[in-house]
Image: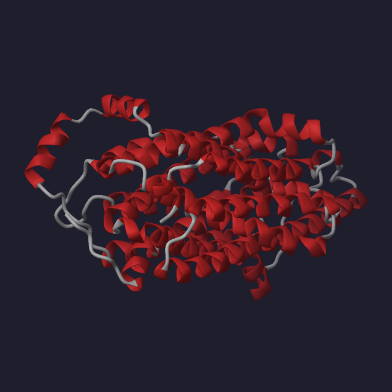
Amino acid sequence: MEKRKLGFWEVWNMSFGFLGIQFGFALQGGFMSRIFQTLGADPHDIPALWVAAPLTGLIVQPIIGYLSDNTWHPKYGRRKPYFLMGAILSSFALFFVPYSSVLWVAAGFLWILDASINISMEPFRALVADKLPESQRSYGFVLQTLIIGIGTWIASNLPWLVSRMGFTDEPAPGIVPEYVKIAFGIGALVFLISILYTVMKTKEYPPDDIEAFKSEKKENRFIHDLSYSIKNMPTTMKKLGLIQFFSWFAFFTMWSMATPALTDYVYKAPAPDKEAYNFTIPAQEQAFNVANTAYQTAADNVGSAMGIYGLSSMAFALLLTFYAAKRTVNRRIIHMFSLIAGGAGFLLMGIGDAALLNVSFILIGISWGSILSMPYAMLSSSVDEKRMGMMMGLFNMFIVIPQIIAALGGINFLSGIISKSSIAPMMLAGIALVIAGLCNFLINDKKVIIG
């Protein structure tokens, strides 16, 4: 079936659910390390606590991609049932995670949250390829990125905004501030509402031949299809996978380590170790409270600064949206320079000046805007549309494997080679993004490059 070109609002409506998905990711990425530290985690242990997130993605996304490829409901379509299922579970996890009383509970909620977000997210990528003709793929993924940027900026600043509305408090040791809990509750509500909006406003194309689809569905076997897809993975997909590897290693390093690194190196306000204080002595308790207040304030500042990368990715995506709506784009060139710009942003943090953090995150946001659009646009031009969900899920391997490596010691080992300073993980992220940018020279298929 030949697909018609869609108007702006049709593409907007089918992508709007990503606002909620990004609320979940931004709150998770910006504040889980803060929750872990508040509950007593040592900075060197934080990457390991994050390992649940990529592990769930590695397992969940290929399964959900396969299931959505082989689903069709006359009312709910192919991808929408998974949007809705993931939204309900994600909203539950988002609401309760800041109420965790001990580390293992917080780590468990992170596992549930990331699995649930992945259930919703993977079909959204496939939906663009389902609904849009080849000529509109770049436009569709860039518009998704615009919505993601809006969500990142608002969600990253939610705790700061809530605290300015009068919900500030001085939490007891080991207790997450009330305004952070309120922000996560708002995020849960936005997640559910935005997904419901897309479900109600978007219609999916049925299979060309419904009887043939049902027949193929009966014959399909997940393990067989998975092994076939891996064996016949396009060369371009493997090259894009190398770029994704270094890109997502860098961003996982930022999500897990930016708060401890920047509160310490830039704001000189590391999280106090409550085991080092004797709370039966008033002076020691007061000293802890002073240090803890300084850390919470610094963490708020880091969260707000990280929100800038969502704002700049939104602006970058907006420019690309206007351009891609009328013209083709050179995806390889855009992606290369965007990643190198983000690498420069991370390396700039080594100066240690709080005034430069916004500049750093503006550059990082340009990378983020490209990471969320260009690789998927290139991938969609190189794989079989009938297996789009499965291939998008498999492509996720190149996202989660570097995160698993980073979580299981890669960050600590490699940043230790660079420096013993607390800012070393951010320097490592910068180097990884520059390498990712240079790997774009490997992409040489003109159909993939121009779109």
Residue 193 visible, this angle: yes
The image shows residue 95 at horizontal and vertical percentages of: 50, 55
Q: Is residue 237 or residue 80 the one in the foreground?
A: 237
Q: Residue furthest bottom?
A: 165
The image shows residue 108 at horizontal and vertical percentages of: 52, 38
Quadrant where the N terminus sits is bottom left
The image shows residue 451 at horizontal and vertical percentages of: 41, 56
> Is the image coloured rainbow, by chain, by secondary structure, or in one colour?
secondary structure
Q: Residue furthest left?
A: 211
User: Left or right: where does residue 70 sit relative to residue 364?
Assistant: left
Query: Who's the residue at 73% across and 56% down the image?
Result: 299
Q: Residue furthest right?
A: 283
Residue 191 visible, this angle: no
Classify 176 as above or below 65: below
Query: Who's the residue at 48% across and 46% down the image?
Result: 113
Query: Who's the residue at 83% across and 50% down the image?
Result: 265
User: Left or right: where does residue 101 sit relative to residue 200?
Assistant: right
Q: Is residue 85 or residue 128 the one in the foreground?
A: 128
Query: Who's the residue at 80% across and 45% down the image?
Result: 423
Total marks shown come to 0
